[in-house]
Amino acid sequence: MLKYANYDIVFQEVPDEVTLAINITNCPNACPGCHSKYLWEDVGEILDLKELNRLVEQYKSGITCVCFMGGDAEPKEVAELAWQLKSTHAGLKMAWYSGKNDLPQNVSTDHFDYIKLGRYVAELGALDSATTNQRMMKRLSDGRVKDITQWFRENKKVEVIKSETKTEKSQTNINSIQ
């Protein structure tokens, strides 16, 4: 059963989208350096289709995308909710921020427009870092999947002092969603 701690309307997590980002709890990844350790606990409100529809209806005039921030403990539920929501809200895009390097093979990702893969590794940085191991993938209209991670570096709002390039990177399997 999925639960969520909170949500917000965000502008940077999904390129060129006004996104309802829902922070899902019970994260199994426990990445060192995580900025959202409160999401490791199995707490919060139940996130089912009724609750998801309530949130979307509340913000539907101002959002273009819904992003599941986490949900790696219950990937089939995340995929099912995304499919149901996409089926009933024409034009609304779906995104998933997964902290896994690979998505489960038995979970369909066809209804996601965006998927971020990769554990957070502090010394490699987040999506806007040149050394990140994380990848943001976008499903194109013809069904192909494109790595758009570069967008985050190109659109970074705050200048950061250049850090040393790391020689050892955690590998993210971007082929798992193709």
Image: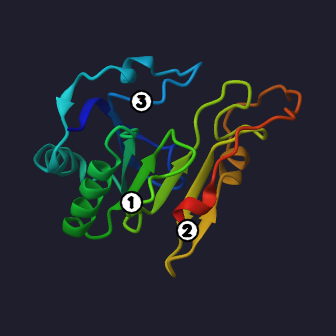
Give residue 55's position: percent from left, percent from top.
20, 44
Mark 1 closeness class: few <14, some 14–19, many ≥20 residues within 10 Å:
few
- Sooner in the amino-acid sequence: mark 3 or mark 1: 3
- What is the residue that sits farthest to the bottom in this orientation? 142
- Along the line of sight, the residue nearer the viewer: 67 or 173: 173
Give residue 173's position: percent from left, percent from top.
63, 53
- Sooner in the amino-acid sequence: mark 1 or mark 2: 1
Residue that appears at 51% across and 38% down: 99
Q: Which amino acid does label 2 sit on?
A: Gln
Q: Which amino acid does label 3 sit on?
A: Pro
Residue that appears at 49% across and 78% down: 141
In the image, taking residue 172 as reference, residue 97 lies left or right, namely left
User: Disc 1 and disc 2: Cα gap in Å?
Assistant: 13 Å
Local secondary structure at mark 1: loop
Give residue 100's position: percent from left, percent from top.
52, 42
Give the residue at mark 3.
Answer: 28
Image disc number at residue 44: none
Choose mark 1 or mark 2, whichever is in front. Answer: 1
Give the residue at mark 1.
Answer: 106
Local secondary structure at mark 2: loop
- Along the line of sight, the residue nearer the viewer: 34 or 15: 34
User: Disc 2 and disc 3: Cα gap in Å?
Assistant: 24 Å
Q: Which amino acid does label 1 sit on?
A: Asn
Image disc number at residue 178: 2
Residue that appears at 52% across and 62% down: 177
Q: Quadrant of the C terminus?
A: bottom right
Mark 2 closeness class: few <14, some 14–19, many ≥20 residues within 10 Å:
few
- What is the residue that sits farthest to the front in this orientation? 106
Q: Quadrant of the N terminus?
A: top left
Question: From the viewer's perspective, is residue 19 above or below residue 40?
Answer: below
Give residue 66's position: percent from left, percent from top.
34, 51
